[in-house]
Amino acid sequence: MARHGERWRAPYACDPAASRGRLVPEPDSPTRSAFQRDRDRIIHSTAFRRLTHKTQVFVWHEGDHFRTRLTHTIEVGQIARALARSLGLDEDLAEAIALSHDLGHTPFGHTGEDALQDLMAPFGGFDHNAQALRIVTRLERRYAFFDGLNLAFETLEGLVKHNGPLLDAAGVPTGSYRTGGVPGAILDFDAAMPLGLDRHAPAEAQAAAIADDIAYDAHDIDDGLRAGILEAEELREVPFLAGLLDEIEAVAPGLEPARRVHELSRRVITRLVEDALAESGRRLAALAPAGPDAIREAGAPVVAFSPAMAEAERAIKGHLFPRLYRHPRVMAVRRDADAVIRELFGRFVADPAALPSEWRAGLDPADPARLARRVADYIAGMTDRYAVTEHRRLFPTTPDLRIV
C-alpha cells in the first residue's frame, strides 16, 4: 500500500521512507512523507513569499501579467511534477527542489546577483545557489530548535546539485565554479552533511532543472511578446519556433495576437516536455538503474533533451539573449537597478547603524568580511520594491525603475 496516498515509484526514484535524514533529527510526520514536509516548509517560508515581488525580467510594476520569481517558480514546480509523474519519480521531492531553486535570487533578477558577485568578490563572492542553501539551512528563523528549514538530505542535495556535479572525480570545481571555486557556504555545509558534490543529483532534481529551462524559454517568449520587445516574425529566425508558428497559422489562421502568443507558449512547453520525457525514457531504459544511487553514479544526466531538441533549446536562448535580456529598454533599467544595489551595499558597509536592529546584532566592526556577508544577506533577501524603499530612505534621489 502506498504511504500517505503517494503514487507508485520506479525503483530508481528517491523513497522518502529511505531518506538519509535531516541535519537535526526530528520525529516523522504521521500524515506527510519527508519530501511532502519539505515542500510545505518551503512554501511557508519567508523567502518563498518574497519571490512574489522579485524580478524575473520585468520589474514588479511593469504590469500584473508579467512573470515574477514566484510565478516562474510555480510554473517550474508544475512542470517538474508532471515530468516526475510520467517518469515514476517522487513528485513531492521534484516539486520541493523546484520550489526552492530560486530562493537565493536577489532583487532585480540577474542584475542584483551580478552586482553582489562583484561587491562580494573580496569576501568570498556571492552565488544565488549558495545563497538558497544559506536561506534553508541558516537564515530562515521559524523553528524552536534549529535555524533554517532543516530539510531532508535529498532536498538539499537536489537544491545544490540540480544543474550537475560541482566537482569532478579529482575534486576540481566544474561548470560555473571552475574559475571562482565552489562557494564557501556549500563547502561548509558539505563538511557537516556530505552532499556528494562530485556526483549527479537524483532524477527528481534533474527533472526540476530541465523544468526550469522549459519554463524560462516559454514564459520569456510570452512576456517579451506581450511587452512589445519581441516580434513574432523575428522568432522565425529560430527554426523550431518557426515550425510552431506555422502550425498555429495552419490550424487557426488569422488568430488574434493575444491568443497567438499563448498558443505559441503552450506549444513550446508541450514539445519540450514531450521530448524530455522521450529522451529520458530512452536513457533510463539503457541505464536500467536499480536505485537512485545508480543515477547519482551514472556520469551523465538521465533527464535530458534529445540532441536535436537540445540544439533547438540553445537556439531559443541564443535568440532571446540579445533581443530580450540585452534589449536597450531592459538594459537602461538594469543600469539603474545595478546602481541601487551598489549604493545600498556601500551605505550599509560604511554605516552598519543604517541596518535594521536585528541585522546589526552580533556584528564586529573589526570583521569586515562578516559585515559584508551580513549586508549581502540583507540585500539579497529584499524584494524589488523594498530595495527601492530602502534606497529612498537613505538617498536623496532614487531611479524610476520602469521600462519605457
Image: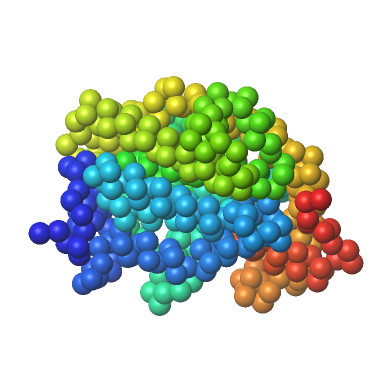
Q: Is residue 175 above or below residue 53?
A: above
Residue at x 17% of width, y 36% of height: 290
Residue 29: where, in percent of width, then height?
24, 70
Viewer-nearest residue: 68 or 96: 68
For the view shown, which residue lies furthest in the right direction?
A: 396
Along the horizontal axis of the image, is 378 left or right of 207?
A: right
Viewer-nearest residue: 218 or 10: 218
Which image quadrant is residue 257 in?
top right
Viewer-nearest residue: 26 or 299: 299
Residue 340: where, in percent of width, then height?
78, 56
For the view shown, which residue lies furthest in the left direction?
A: 1
Which image quadrant is residue 149 in?
bottom left
Q: Quadrant of the N terminus?
A: bottom left
Which image quadrant is residue 177 in?
top right
Is residue 264 in view from this perspective? yes
Residue 237: where, in percent of width, then height?
63, 24
Is residue 187 in view from this perspective? no
Q: Is residue 70 above or below residue 30?
A: above
Q: Is residue 211 above or below residue 140?
A: above
Residue at x 72% of width, y 44% of height: 228
Along the horizontal axis of the image, is 384 left or right of 297?
A: right
Residue at x 48% of width, y 35% of height: 251
Residue 39: where, in percent of width, then height?
37, 61
